Amino acid sequence: MTQPATPIKFYTFPVSGNTHRVELLLRALDLPFERIDIDLRGKQQKSEAFLAMNPFGQVPVIDDNGTIIWDSVAILTYLALTYDTERKYLPTEPKRFAEVMAWVSKASGPIAFGLAAARRIHIFNTPADPAPAHQIAHDFLHVMDEHLATRAWLVDDTLTLADLACYAYVAHAPEGGVDLKPFENVTGWLARLEAQPFFVAMPKSKVGLWAE
């Protein structure tokens, strides 16, 4: 695996699942990086300087020696293509590449509109009905649990971007009021990822099922 010329500047927020998936890949690839926490509550992400990097004013963003990439999926793909010379996390064989990207795409679909949306309602105490998000989350988890019944990881028997992209919001589903206990294959998968030597946890918030 190659290394960047200088440490990668990583603009993040401690309890963002989108940024956490990027941090997991940075650590999995053993890449040097400088963590820069953005004050989302203080609207630092809407400052002129930050909007110059990401016009949508969102984390994560990376600055790789002048190459600026925003959006977590785009960053995962960039890092894998640039630094994972073994193609461990994003295989080049067309079928496996497609299978990985199919799961990565769920980060912007049912994970975002189900698990992450329910969690956001609880964390920010927004006046919204979590029921639609809960239904999306449960439908997704049922499919994921069945898929993991015959395999250790989401694609073949190797940890890939598919697993890293899906992990954070699934692991923190209880913060959104979604119980993971019925999904034993999913919780087993979470445990396997959490046992990886590069793994770092995202801070827990005392909301939802973790309120006590």
Image (cartoon, rainbow, N blue to C red):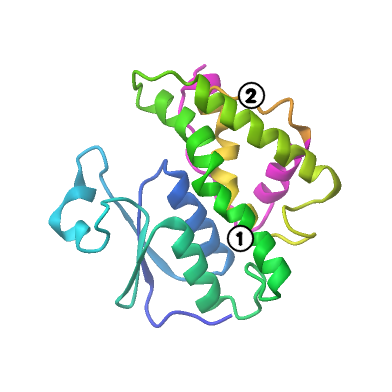
**x then y, percent, for residue 187:** 71, 37
**x then y, percent, for residue 56:** 27, 53
Who is closer to the viewer here, 43 or 14? 43
Residue 178 to residue 191: above or below: above
**x then y, percent, for residue 181:** 71, 26
Who is closer to the viewer here, 157 or 26? 157
> Can residue 9 be seen from the camera position used here?
yes
Which numbered dot is residue 207?
A: none
Q: Residues within 10 Å of mark 1 (few under 14, many from 20)?
A: some
- What residue is at 35 percent from the left and 27 percent from the top? 124
* Highlighted range, magenta: 185-212
The amino acid type found where label 1 is placed reads Met
Left or right, residue 77 beside residue 43: right
- What residue is at 80 percent from the left and 59 percent from the top? 157
- What residue is at 45 percent from the left and 70 percent from the top? 32
How many labels sit on residues? 2
Q: Marks 1 and 2: which is nearer the front?
A: 1
Residue 201 belongs to magenta span: yes
Q: Secondary structure at mark 2?
A: loop
Q: Residues within 10 Å of mark 2 (few under 14, many from 20)?
A: some
Who is closer to the viewer here, 197 or 75? 75
**x then y, percent, for residue 5:** 40, 83
Residue 143 to residue 124: above or below: below
The amino acid type found where label 2 is placed reads Asp
Which numbered dot is residue 179?
A: 2
Give the quadrant of residue 88.
bottom right
Mark 1 — residue?
Answer: 101
Q: Secondary structure at mark 1?
A: helix
Give the quadrant of residue 171.
top right
Left or right, residue 14 beside residue 80: left
